[in-house]
């Protein structure tokens, strides 16, 4: 593909990911307004977020697999359409029930956007530019979380919350014709039958784990884990893991191919994604730490998180460019080292504003070196072309599972230490230890010359 065309492809992918990322960034400020607008309880309005998460988890591997077989363009357009339809349903919702329905449609569509975008980069960009392109796409989330809350605040001040969900419509008017023209249309059909059994098992597995983990009460983890609404779903999800593995080994065209765990590099990438998700998820607890440590308001504590968000948007393209120069091993080692240093500062050093901002910048750069591009870069180099989107979906699923585990890990440790500054400091000590483990794992990744040879063999 010509260089000018790859630029247009990247623009299409950037806009699609930005559309989905902005929705994640605005939903926090929108939830109180939705609750008050329908006179709902806090417990009921949580389903606006939980339903999105459940359907997003299910949609991610399913849409990715379909794009591997039918082509990127058609699936990307369908994902954008589903996302916009869900947004319109939410905007026009006459009741909270319809908001939840719309959020489910949104989540299902959004699930495929990022994995398919990453797979398109593998299809269209030469190996020596993939890291740069993945870094540009990865920076979208930092940009979205910088402008999303501000945008939501302005809209909520002058309009109703409904206007927030009309936003994806102009995105779609630009994206759909551009995607239809510029994205690759051909898939790689399989002779095997569709893996309906695997799809169903995976959907039930992910839904069960997501529901159970979201119902855990971190302040009393043991008691909540024993409650019927948690333990049954948790055990079901865990029990289905070996069943799914057995079914996929016998499937003609498995939704998650066993070869996506078939090399050390792939196993390490998935493990690193899980750990990075746990560390990323811990960022939601930082405002509570700041309120306890500095007696600031919750809004000011959230504002103090801006250095983390800014470094994500700055670091992702920088580290993406570094992938093309030095390979994933050194970038991931640096990222895990920075994350370890930042979380250790939050856990072991007496907290002052200076200490916090240094730690926040370190963690932000560390996460941008993990979540922005490197793990997806690894998967593009290791996964066969006919499984590229499925491999990207697997990284997304592992990261999201890690994020869901965070509430149980951080909350339980903080509660066991009596909460407050000491409790959260203990949690970040644990996370610092996890980051050290991730650093040790990253040492086992392929060296640059070996990785480059693997990428060139696919070109």
Image (cartoon, rainbow, N blue to C red):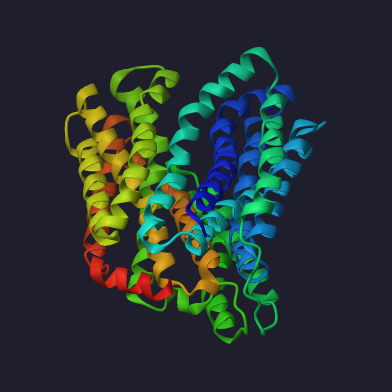
Q: Residue furthest right?
A: 94
Q: In this orientation, does residue 274 appear?
A: no
Residue at 38% from the left image edge and 76% from the top image edge: 457
Q: Quadrant of residue 49?
A: top right
Q: Is residue 58 left or right of residue 143?
A: right
Q: Quadrant of the C terminus?
A: bottom left
Count of labels in the image: 0
Residue 8 rendering spot, x and y as whole percentages:
55, 47
Q: Above or below — where is 1 with respect to 241?
A: above
Residue 43 rendering spot, x and y as whole percentages:
63, 36
Which is more toward the observer, 430 or 59?
Answer: 59
Q: Above or below — where is 68 with respect to 138?
A: below
Q: Is residue 35 left or right of residue 217?
A: right
Residue at 49% from the left image edge and 78% from the top image edge: 258
Which is more toward the observer, 135 or 456?
Answer: 456
Residue at 25% from the left image edge and 66% from the top image edge: 448
Which is more toward the observer, 378 or 27?
Answer: 378
Q: In this orientation, does residue 371 appear?
A: yes
Q: Above or below — where is 40 with respect to 72?
A: above
Q: Residue furthest top?
A: 158
Residue at 67% from the left image edge and 52% from the top image edge: 181
Residue 332 rendering spot, x and y as whole percentages:
28, 56
Residue 234 rendering spot, x and y as whole percentages:
54, 61
């Amino acid at each position: 593909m010509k260089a000018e065309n790859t630029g247009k492809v990247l623009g299409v992918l950037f806009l699609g990911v930005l559309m989905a990322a902005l929705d994640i960034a605005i939903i926090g400020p929108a939830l109180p307004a939705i609750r008050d607008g329908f006179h709902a309880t806090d417990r009921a309005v949580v389903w606006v977020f939980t339903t999105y998460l459940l359907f997003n988890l299910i949609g991610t591997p399913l849409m990715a697999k379909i794009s591997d077989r039918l082509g990127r363009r058609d699936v990307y357009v369908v994902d954008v359409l589903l996302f916009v339809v869900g947004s319109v349903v939410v905007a026009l919702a006459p009741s909270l029930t319809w908001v939840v329905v719309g959020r489910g449609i949104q989540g299902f569509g959004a699930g495929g956007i990022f994995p398919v975008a990453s797979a398109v980069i593998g299809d269209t960009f030469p190996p020596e530019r993939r890291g740069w392109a993945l870094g540009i796409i990865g920076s979208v989330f930092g940009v979205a979380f910088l402008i999303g809350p501000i945008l939501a605040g302005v809209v909520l001040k002058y309009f109703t919350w409904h206007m927030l969900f009309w936003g994806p419509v102009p995105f779609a008017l630009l994206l759909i014709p551009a995607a239809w023209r510029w994205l690759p249309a051909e898939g790689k059909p399989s002779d095997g039958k569709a893996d309906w059994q695997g799809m169903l098992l995976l959907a039930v597995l992910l839904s069960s784990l997501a529901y159970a983990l979201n119902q855990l009460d971190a302040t009393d983890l043991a008691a909540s884990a024993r409650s019927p609404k948690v333990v049954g779903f948790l055990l079901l999800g865990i029990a289905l893991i070996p069943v799914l593995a057995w079914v996929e080994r016998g499937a003609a065209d498995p939704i998650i191919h066993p070869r996506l765990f078939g090399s050390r590099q792939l196993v390490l990438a998935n493990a690193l994604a899980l750990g990075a998700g746990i560390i990323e998820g811990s960022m939601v607890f930082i405002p509570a730490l700041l309120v306890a440590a500095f007696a600031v308001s919750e809004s000011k504590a959230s504002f103090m998180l801006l250095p983390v968000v800014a470094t994500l948007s700055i670091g992702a393209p920088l580290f993406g460019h570094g992938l093309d120069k030095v390979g994933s091993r050194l970038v991931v080692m640096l990222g895990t080292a920075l994350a370890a240093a930042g979380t250790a500062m939050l856990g072991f050093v007496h907290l002052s504003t200076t200490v916090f901002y240094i730690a926040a910048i370190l963690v932000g750069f560390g996460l941008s070196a993990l979540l922005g591009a490197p793990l997806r870069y690894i998967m593009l180099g290791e996964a066969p072309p006919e499984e590229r989107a499925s491999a990207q979906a697997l990284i997304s699923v592992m990261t999201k599972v890690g994020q869901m585990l965070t509430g149980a890990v951080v909350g339980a440790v903080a509660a066991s230490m009596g909460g407050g500054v000491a409790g959260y400091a203990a949690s970040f000590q644990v996370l610092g230890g996890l980051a050290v483990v991730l650093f040790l794992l990253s040492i086992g990744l392929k060296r640059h010359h070996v990785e480059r040879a693997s990428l060139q063999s696919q070109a």
